[in-house]
């Protein structure tokens, strides 16, 4: 089952911040592939969702960019700023608390193996 874009939309900034915290610097396509790999293809980020999120995080001062020239191609890497490093843990904790609250609200029992 692939999760709906509606569910992913509210968590995308947190996903991107956590990816960058774990991987130092990444380019957009690399992020989409890493998310697909980590989630067993249950979350598939589109460029139409990812790049506006990256630009918003850049405007907020959470990420910075650096260009790398590979032959005639230019690759834009994203990495956390100092503010982004500080905010990532807060965002991840907030999301974890939200998920626990949703379990209570929806009366969802933990899955057993």
Image: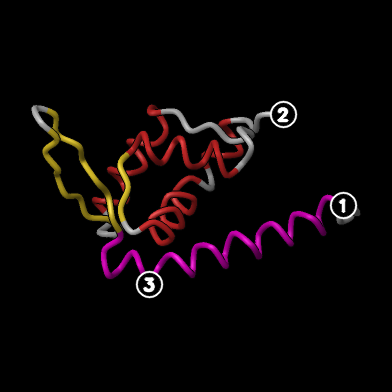
Numbered circle sitting on residue 95: none
Secondary structure beneath dot 2 equals: loop
The quarter of the picture where residue 39 lies is: top right
Numbered circle sitting on residue 111: 1
For the record, the magenta segment spans 80-108
Residue 72 appears left or right of 83: left
Residue 51 on image: x %, y %: 33, 36
- The secondary structure making up most of the magenta span is helix
Mark 2 sits on what residue?
1
Relative to 82, residue 31 above or below = above
Task: Assess disc 3: are there few (<14), some (14-19) or many (≥20) residues with their C-alpha within 10 Å of its C-alpha.
Answer: few
The quarter of the picture where residue 28 lies is: top left
Picture quarter with the N terminus: top right
Magenta segment: does it hold 85? yes
Q: CA distance from mark 1 to mark 3?
A: 32 Å
Mark 3 sits on what residue?
86
């Amino acid at each position: 089952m692939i999760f709906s874009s509606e569910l992913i939309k509210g968590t995308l900034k947190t996903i991107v911040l956590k990816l960058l915290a774990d991987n130092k610097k990444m380019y957009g396509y690399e992020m989409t592939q890493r998310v697909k790999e980590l989630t067993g293809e249950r979350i598939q980020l589109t460029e139409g969702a990812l790049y506006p999120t990256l630009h918003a995080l850049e405007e907020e001062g959470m990420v910075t960019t650096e260009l790398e020239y590979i032959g005639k191609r230019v690759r834009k890497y994203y990495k956390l700023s100092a503010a982004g490093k500080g905010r990532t843990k807060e965002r991840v904790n907030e999301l974890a608390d939200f998920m626990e609250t949703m379990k209570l609200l929806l009366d969802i029992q933990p899955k057993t193996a």
